[in-house]
Image (tube, grey):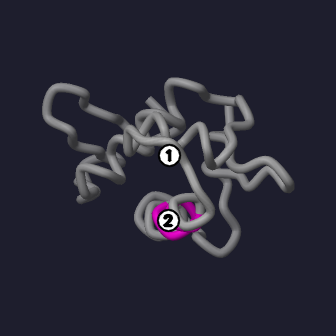
Amino acid sequence: MINDLVLDQATGQVQRGEEDINLTPTEFRLLNYLARHRGQALTRGQIVEAVWGYASDVESEKTVNVHIRRLREKIELKPDQPSLIMTVPGIGYRLAK
């Protein structure tokens, strides 16, 4: 559980209350990885390797930024003022505790 979000590992579903939040498989893996490392600052490279399964490069790290933005649009109450997925300047991202 992440604040008011419930991640169902068996089905790959995310819910907020009674509302289903439709994530792509990649978005679910990304959120799940952040949740397993909650509170830790993770580099884009670490995220690429864990979620996509290959060594990162500049282009793949940009892909992380795009996926984080899309994930925020789906799970944050105010995507332009994120309270769940935080940007860590000079490092990457972390999921709030």
As for residue 65 lying within the magenta part, the answer is yes
Kindly indicate the quadrant of the structure image that contains residue 87. bottom right
Q: Is residue 67 above or below residue 26?
A: below
Mark 2 lies on residue: 63
Mark 2 or mark 1: whose residue is earlier in sequence: 1
Q: Is residue 56 above or below residue 71?
A: above
Q: Which mark is residue 48?
A: 1
Q: Main secondary structure of the magenta part?
A: helix
Instruction: Identify the secondary structure beneath mark 1.
Output: helix
- Return the x and y of residue 5 as percentages of the image width and height: 42, 41
Range of the magenta residues?
Answer: 62-67
Please give the name of the residue rendered at 59% of the width and 70% of the height, measured from the top-left corner: 78
- Return the x and y of residue 62 as percentages of the image width and height: 58, 67
Task: In this rendered view, identify the residue nearer to me: 52 or 77.
Answer: 52
Please state if 62 lies on the left or on the right of 71 as rendered. Answer: right
Task: In this rendered view, identify the residue nearer to me: 15 or 33.
Answer: 33
Please give the name of the residue rendered at 36% of the width and 53% of the height, measured from the top-left corner: 27
Mark 1 closeness class: few <14, some 14–19, many ≥20 residues within 10 Å: many
- Return the x and y of residue 68 as percentages of the image width and height: 53, 60
Quarter of the image where the C terminus is located:
top right
Q: As drawn, which residue projects farthest toward the left?
A: 11
Q: Decide: marks 2, 1 in contact (CB < 8 A)? A: yes
As for residue 36 lying within the magenta part, the answer is no
Mark 2 closeness class: few <14, some 14–19, many ≥20 residues within 10 Å: some
Alpha carbon distance from label 2 to label 1: 9 Å
Instruction: Identify the secondary structure beneath mark 2.
Output: helix
Task: In this rendered view, identify the residue nearer to me: 33 or 2.
Answer: 33
Quarter of the image where the N terminus is located:
top left
Q: Amino acid at mark 2?
A: Thr
Please state if 23 lies on the left or on the right of 43 as rendered. Answer: left
Q: Amino acid at mark 1?
A: Val
